[in-house]
Amino acid sequence: LSEFIINLSEFIINLSDFIWEWNAPFLVGGGIFFLIYSKLTPLKYVIHAFELIRGKYTKPEDIGEVTHFQALTTALSGTIGLGNISGVALAIGYGGPGVIFWMWVTAIVGIATKFFTCTLSVMYRDVDEDGTVRSGPMYIIKNALPKSMMPLAYFFAAAGLIGALPGFQSNQMVEMLETLPIFDFKYFNLMAGIILAVITGAIIFGGLVRIAKVSEWLVPSMSILYFGSVMVALVLNFDAVIPAFQIIIQDAFTGSAVAGGSVIAVIIMGVKRSAHSNEAGIGTESLVHGSAKTSDPVKQGLVAMLGPIFDTLIMCTSTALLIIISGVWLNIGPNVEGVKLTAEAFSVLL
């Protein structure tokens, strides 16, 4: 059975690498097209987007289930945690510091991608008689495209169901806890899995509204705590911050840290990790943004585009600087454990 699991894992990894080789240009190219087509409109209204999440233009009679802020924090809840901690560490471990530069590029064009996808999600959402909102790529396909495209809607629904499972998050969390002596006992993995399942179930079975209410306070709290900790480490090692940025930019065009020294490999790794970090262009981000209380789809598109800014340009960059300055990325083995690498960086700098 273990051999079967190993072979299956290798097959999935190889399939993923193959898909990303031709998918990455579409993801970045699509974002560039949206930026040019909109004449950089999303970037011009960043300040207005912050006003929207503060509820400045919200109307009580607007249709939807969650506020602008709740929609944003719920979307970020799936990425702003381990996507910024473990994901960045894995990216640097496998692709070198240069990966971060291409994450920035993908995030900037991803701002436009997210603006358009989430605007469309509100435009073409379905609203039931009881006020329940149904949105996402499935409903964009259903309501905006010919019926012949409906198989794509069913395919995304099935793929999204599998892709949204929290296997990566729970795995990395348990790996981190196992490093503590208090959790070093038999069957800890099983107990941790059961506890996580119970807590998660108690939240998700309450529907989108309960998920949004939890995310509304949990995401800002954990973001401030983590970002504050990183800032303390960076301030204590301030003289190394500028050289770290120089390493990122220099390595982005050399590919020296990747097997074979391929710059293309660095770019693809950066695109993959950026997409994992902020979900721009993946489609899952529009599922919750489409349920926001708003009468103007463009408003929610503007709110949604803040995701890549918070997630990749701020949080991921802070983690990258932490790891690069600490130097832990220089002495890693073939089996990189992302969350442990970040924890080690903290222990070195603090």
Image (tube, helix red, strand yellow):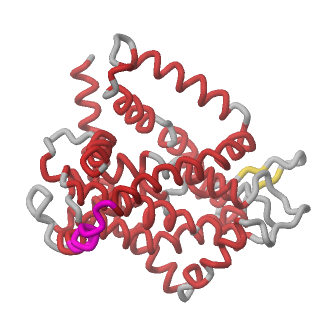
Residue 254, above or below 21: below
* Rendered-image quadrant of the N terminus: top left
Going 35% across and 63% down the picture, which residue do you hit? 235
Q: Nearer the viewer, residue 291 or 317?
A: 317
Going 52% across and 52% down the picture, which residue do you hit? 223
Going 63% across and 58% down the picture, which residue do you hit? 72
| Residue 142 can be seen, yes or no | no
Residue 65, above or below 121: above
Using residue 165 as the reference point, say whether residue 148 is left or right of it.
right
Using residue 126 as the reference point, say whether residue 330 is left or right of it.
left
Q: Looking at the magenta stretch, what is its main secondary structure?
A: helix
Point out residue 106 in the picture as x, y percentages from the top left corner. 39, 69
Which range of residues does the magenta coloring cover? 236-246
Residue at the far left: name it: 260
Point out residue 244 in the picture as x, y percentages from the top left corner. 24, 68
Point out residue 63 in the picture as x, y percentages from the top left corner. 84, 59
State how many labels appear: 0
Going 66% across and 71% down the picture, which residue do you hit? 50
Residue at the far bottom: name it: 39
Residue 238 counted in the magenta span: yes
Using residue 129 as the reference point, say whether residue 134 is left or right of it.
left
Using residue 325 as the reference point, say whether residue 45 is left or right of it.
right
